[in-house]
Image (cartoon, rainbow, N blue to C red):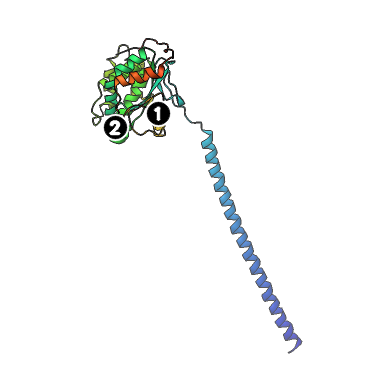
Amino acid sequence: MSQKNREGKRTAREAMHEQREKDKAREKRKRTLIVGGAVVVVLAIAGVVAGVLANHKSEPAKPVASPKGATGNDNLVIPTGAADAPSTLTVYEDFRCPGCGMFEKTFRDTVHSLEDSGALKADYHLVTIIDGNMGGTGSLNAGNAAVCAQDAGKFRAFHDVLYENQPDEREDKFGDKAYLLELADKVPGLKTDTFTACVNNGTYDSWIKKSAAAFGGSGFSSTPTVLLNGKSVYGNQTDPLTPDKLKQQVEAANKGKKAGTVTPTPTS
């Protein structure tokens, strides 16, 4: 083979090698650009998500309006009776609940008597079980109206009126705000412009919903749930509670304790 041919073959091999190296370099640059672009996209998405979260966190939660005199966790309790009474009756109730209506009709006078003597105070938790089970808004609307009455210092009186006029749970008559305002006429001095606006505007709807949500996490599942000084006393079919038994239990719990300071309570 001539020197010229050998040099020609070597030059061809070198050219092929050089081309392969260029191809490899080009592929490497391409992969680098792809990976780099993906990283940029991921970082951009992460930046957008972080921005959304930051904006979300920066928006303060809207406070839930609480009625005058509300107590307990998150101000979700409506108290009646002397604040310093030695015993407390805790009641979880739904104004559409027929069992709650039965409890009120049976024990209302006894509870009022114990409250008015300073022996007992009651803590009411308002919930909306029947609205959830049967549909409608009667539990919510009646609860809101009762809390509007609390603002006017007439919760107990209107509370009694609602149960005295409780419709069949399937009718959802309490869903009609006009009917609730009609019932307010039964409590002297309650139906003011302020009360009417409170009922019509659903001023405390969010408060009622928050109270109902708190009931969901309370460990109880039905209404009425009635506790005396933290102990369940109602609903035991083998040993049913009676008004006389309730009096006896309160007297026993209060033995040696001073009665609470009683202030006059408006009645219907």
Seen from this angle, which residue lies furthest top? 264
- N-terminal-most mark, 2 or 1: 2
Inspect this view and state whether residue 242 appears: yes
Q: Which residue is mark 2?
A: 136
Image coordinates of residue 127 in percent, x first then y, are: 35, 29
**Identity of the amino acid at label 2?**
Gly
Identified at 29% across, 24% down, the residue is 103
Inspect this view and state whether residue 150 appears: no
Residue 211, numbered circle: 1
Seen from this angle, which residue lies furthest bottom? 1
Q: Is residue 188 depicted above or below 231 in this figure?
A: above
User: Dot 2, crowdedness within 10 Å: few (<14), some or many (≥20)?
Assistant: some
- The mark closer to the camera, 2 or 1, is 1
**Identity of the amino acid at label 1?**
Ser
Image coordinates of residue 30 in percent, x first then y, are: 61, 62
In this orientation, which residue lies closer to the viewer: 64 or 40? Answer: 64
Kindly indicate the quadrant of the structure image that contains residue 187. top left
Q: Is residue 11 depicted above or below 157 in this figure?
A: below
Image coordinates of residue 95 in percent, x first then y, are: 30, 26
Identified at 42% across, 11% down, the residue is 261
Kindly indicate the quadrant of the structure image that contains residue 126. top left
In this rendering, position of residue 10 left or right of residue 199: right
Q: Judging from the image, what secondary structure is the residue with disc 1 in?
A: helix
Identified at 59% across, 51% down, the residue is 40
In this orientation, which residue lies closer to the viewer: 108 or 208? Answer: 108
Identified at 42% across, 34% down, the residue is 217
Kindly indicate the quadrant of the structure image that contains residue 194. top left
User: Dot 1, crowdedness within 10 Å: few (<14), some or many (≥20)?
Assistant: many
